[in-house]
Every structure is written in structure tokens, then in C-alpha cells.
């Protein structure tokens, strides 16, 4: 395998043309699209148009004339096919953290005598933080359980009120068995909330087929909605009827503009909405999701696995001897869309690479993470990235970047 082979793979790749849908800076190897997706080519002009024309000239008429009022549902319906959901099952609003609270508080409240809310130790921190808060607020004698990594299935029982788990582990990139765990929990009457932040837009997600009832995920990672863009909430058609919102705002009301004195929940996914939407960001979510037009998720996920497989093969050849230890499963079917390594100096290595135009990220305590974005990443990018990491490691250039202080965002 050499660079020319990678070029050939790019030339033969049916998804290669998708890269042109993005505005990517020259001279940057971007391997952090799993934290913040790249800028779609249409976003700037559409946002400018929204500001100048829809808002500037239309003023408040924009809610109907420009469809701002329906954006949360439009964006949800656009995301639905990417995660194996149906129209009307997804709405976009608030942050992932807040959406976890909204689902968890409601599910915990109707859990009867069941006491355990289970997360996995080492999962993305906000998930457990939010559950901890919800359990405390409800004050029903429920308890947050942190299962061993990979150990949730063994801890679930008839005393379990709720399970919350990421589909892809943000550190190692391990892909969890959504279908198996959901089925096991269902058999015990336990609702599961799947966090899709690290899978939506890069990994095949089949919510309906796996009979998932509840899921959340963000839009600024693989879905390219832009920094801080609002998150999505999915509640299945089967589950939406019995779902009673815990956060009861006017956007979730059955008849919002009647301004009734009492709350009545909408009889649709709208009951997951709370307050006025961030219209500018929601508009950008549509642009981000539009980049997936005509792309089949199984094909895209296949490309992701080929890119990460290439990364792993090259790393075996060139990086292992420099002490970078693969943290991501080798088996393609157990891999999300990233390749992570452990190294005690991972932070300094990440800083060095960024200074040289390759952007990965660092995750505490020792993870160097390379996000794979199959919609706009090329095989040559993987080649060039591994080569640069090899150079930095053999020079020991990261030693200059060693520091005890960490920046506020890593
Ligand atoms: C990125 C990410 C989040 C982010 O939550 P926000 O509320 O949008 O900041 C949550 N969960 C997981 C697993 C993530 O990867």
C-alpha cells in the first residue's frame, strides 16, 4: 500500500464527490469532524439570507412566511432516515444534555418501584451527570448505578428503571450492540435511551429495526450543523402516546397559540419541544443534513470502516513501534467512526500535530483520537495523517509541547 494506491481508492469511490459539498480549508488534515463537523458549502449564504431577508425584511412574519415555526420538525424529519427512524419520530431542539434530562426525568417518574438508573462507567460524562441530577430531583429513592464498561447487560434486572448508553464509546470508538441490549432490556420492561452523538451521520443506526423507543444525539458532530447547533430527540411511534413530558413548555402544548392557562401535551413528537428554537442554528442543521442527500447510510458506514481499517493497518506498520497503542476494536463490525490510541503523552502529541496542520483531539487521560468522517474524508488523507504522526513520533517533536497545564477545551 502506498499513496498512489490511496489515490486510486479515492478515484474509484462512489462517495468521493460528496467532499465538494463542504468548504474545507487548504492545508488542513481534519480528523475532528466527530467533535465539530465541517462547514457545508451552502451554510454561509443561507444563514446570511435568513438574517438579511427573512429576519431583516420579513421581521416577525418569518415564523410563518419563512417557516421558522416548523424548523424543529423539518430538521427532525431530515435526520430521521439517517438514523433508521420514520417521519414524525424526531424533533430538533435544546442540547443533548437537556434532551437526556427531558427523556430521563419522564421515564424515571413512571418507573413505579424500580430503583436503578444505569449508566456505564467511563461513558460520556454529561449523561451520568444529568441522570444524577434527575434522580436527585425526583427524590423517589432511585439510585444511579455505574456499571463496569461492557457490563450493563449483566446489571439490568426487574429493579431497573432506566438504562442510558452511548451507541459508540467516545474514547475507544467501540460500537455497542444496540439490537441485543435493547431486546434484553425490553424483555425486562426496562426503557433504554440511546445516545447517538458519536454515531448519527457516520455509523449505520437502525432505530426502528432495533425496536428502540428513545434516543438523543447532537447535530454539530457528524451531522455538520455548526458549533452549538441544537440536538435531536427521538421517541418511537409506539412510545410517544404514553410519553408524558417532564419539562412542559409552551412549544410542547397541544394548542400553543390558544394561550390556555393549563398545560396540555401535544399528541406528537412536539411534546418534546419546550421553548423558542434557535432559528439560525436550526437552519444550519438543515444544510448540514442536506450534505447526505442521495447517500445510503450502509455505504457511508462501509466507507467509514474502510478508512478506519486503512488507518489501523498503516498504524500497525508505522506507529505501534512508537508506543501508540490501538484503543479501538480491530473488528470492523465493533467499530464506530474513529481510531483512538493510548499514549501517556497523548496531549502533547495532539498539540504537536495540530501545530503541523493535522487536527485530531485528545481525551483524558491518555487518548489520542482521530475522527473518521466518510462524507468528506479521502483515503489519501488517512495516508498523509499516519505519515505525519510517524514523523512527529520519530522526531520526538511532541517533547516541546509537553505541559502540565491543559487548555480549557481539548
Ligand atoms: C458530544 C456528546 C454530548 C454533548 O452533549 P451537549 O449537551 O450537546 O453538549 C453528549 N453525549 C455524548 C455521548 C457526546 O459525544
Image (cartoon, grey):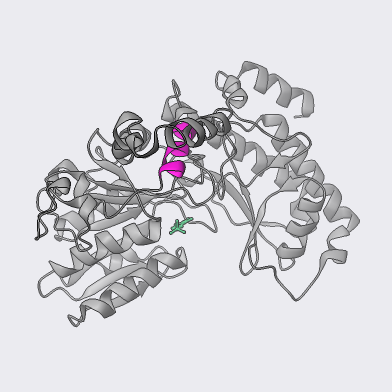
Instruction: Give residue 250's quadrant in the image.
Output: bottom left
Instruction: Give residue 406's quadrant in the image.
Output: bottom right
Identified at 49% across, 41% down, the residue is 225
Task: Using the image as rendered, state which of residue 206 and residue 253 is in the foreground.
Answer: 253
Which quarter of the rendered picture does the C terminus lie within?
A: bottom right
Left or right: where does residue 114 sit relative to residue 41?
left
Identified at 56% across, 29% down, the residue is 45
**Residue 177 visible in the snapshot:** no
Identified at 22% across, 44% down, the residue is 211
Q: Position of residue 233 (x, y in %)?
A: 31, 49
Left or right: where does residue 255 sit relative to residue 378?
left
Q: Does the magenta run of residues contain 322?
A: no
**Residue 156 visible in the snapshot:** yes
Which quarter of the rendered picture does the N terminus lie within?
A: top right
Q: Quadrant of ligand 1?
A: bottom left
Left or right: where does residue 71 sit relative to residue 402?
left
Position above or below: 368 against 62:
below
The segment highlighted magenta reads 279-289
Number of numbered labels in the structure image: 0
Left or right: where does residue 66 sit relative to residue 272?
right
Task: Using the image as rendered, state which of residue 204 and residue 200 is in the foreground.
Answer: 200
Q: Position of residue 306 (x, y in %)?
A: 58, 33
Task: Using the image as rendered, state which of residue 159 and residue 81 is in the foreground.
Answer: 81
Amino acid at each position: 500500500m502506498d499513496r498512489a494506491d490511496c489515490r486510486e481508492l479515492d478515484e474509484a469511490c462512489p462517495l468521493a464527490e460528496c467532499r465538494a459539498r463542504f468548504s474545507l480549508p487548504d492545508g488542513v488534515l481534519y480528523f475532528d469532524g466527530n467533535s465539530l463537523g465541517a462547514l457545508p458549502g451552502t451554510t454561509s449564504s443561507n444563514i446570511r439570507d435568513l438574517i438579511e431577508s427573512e429576519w431583516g425584511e420579513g421581521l416577525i412574519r418569518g415564523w410563518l412566511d419563512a417557516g421558522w415555526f416548523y424548523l424543529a420538525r423539518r430538521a427532525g424529519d431530515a435526520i430521521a432516515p439517517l438514523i433508521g427512524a420514520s417521519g414524525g419520530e424526531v424533533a430538533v431542539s435544546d442540547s443533548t444534555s437537556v434532551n437526556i434530562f427531558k427523556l430521563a426525568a419522564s421515564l424515571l417518574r413512571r418507573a413505579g418501584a424500580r430503583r436503578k438508573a444505569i449508566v456505564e462507567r467511563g461513558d460520556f460524562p454529561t449523561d451520568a451527570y444529568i441522570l444524577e441530577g434527575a434522580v436527585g430531583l425526583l427524590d423517589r429513592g432511585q439510585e444511579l448505578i455505574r456499571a463496569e464498561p461492557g457490563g450493563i447487560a449483566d446489571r439490568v434486572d426487574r429493579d431497573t428503571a432506566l438504562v442510558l448508553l452511548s451507541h459508540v464509546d467516545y474514547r475507544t470508538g467501540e460500537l455497542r450492540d444496540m439490537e441485543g441490549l435493547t431486546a434484553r432490556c425490553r424483555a425486562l420492561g426496562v426503557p433504554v435511551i440511546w445516545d447517538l452523538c458519536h454515531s448519527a451521520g457516520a455509523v449505520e443506526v437502525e432505530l426502528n429495526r432495533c425496536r428502540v423507543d428513545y434516543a438523543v444525539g447532537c447535530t454539530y458532530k457528524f451531522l455538520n450543523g455548526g458549533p452549538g447547533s441544537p440536538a435531536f430527540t427521538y421517541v418511537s411511534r409506539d412510545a410517544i402516546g404514553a410519553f408524558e413530558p417532564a419539562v412542559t413548555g409552551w412549544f410542547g402544548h397541544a394548542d400553543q397559540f390558544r394561550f390556555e392557562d393549563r398545560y396540555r401535551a401535544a399528541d406528537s413528537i412536539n411534546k418534546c419541544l419546550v421553548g423558542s428554537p434557535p432559528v439560525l442554528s436550526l437552519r444550519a442543521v438543515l444544510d448540514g443534513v442536506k450534505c447526505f442527500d442521495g447517500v445510503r447510510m450502509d455505504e457511508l458506514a462501509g466507507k467509514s470502516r474502510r478508512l478506519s481499517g486503512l488507518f489501523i493497518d498503516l498504524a500497525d506498520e508505522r506507529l505501534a513501534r512508537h508506543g501508540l497503542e490501538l484503543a479501538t476494536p480491530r473488528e470492523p463490525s465493533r467499530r464506530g467512526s474513529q481510531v483512538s490510541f493510548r499514549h501517556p503523552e497523548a496531549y502533547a502529541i495532539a498539540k504537536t500535530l495540530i501545530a503541523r496542520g493535522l487536527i485530531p483531539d485528545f481525551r483524558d487521560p491518555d487518548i489520542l483520537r482521530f475522527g473518521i468522517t466518510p462524507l468528506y474524508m479521502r483515503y489519501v488523507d488517512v495516508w498523509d495523517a499516519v505519515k505525519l504522526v510517524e514523523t512527529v513520533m520519530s522526531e520526538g517533536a511532541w517533547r516541546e509541547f509537553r505541559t502540565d497545564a491543559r487548555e480549557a477545551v481539548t
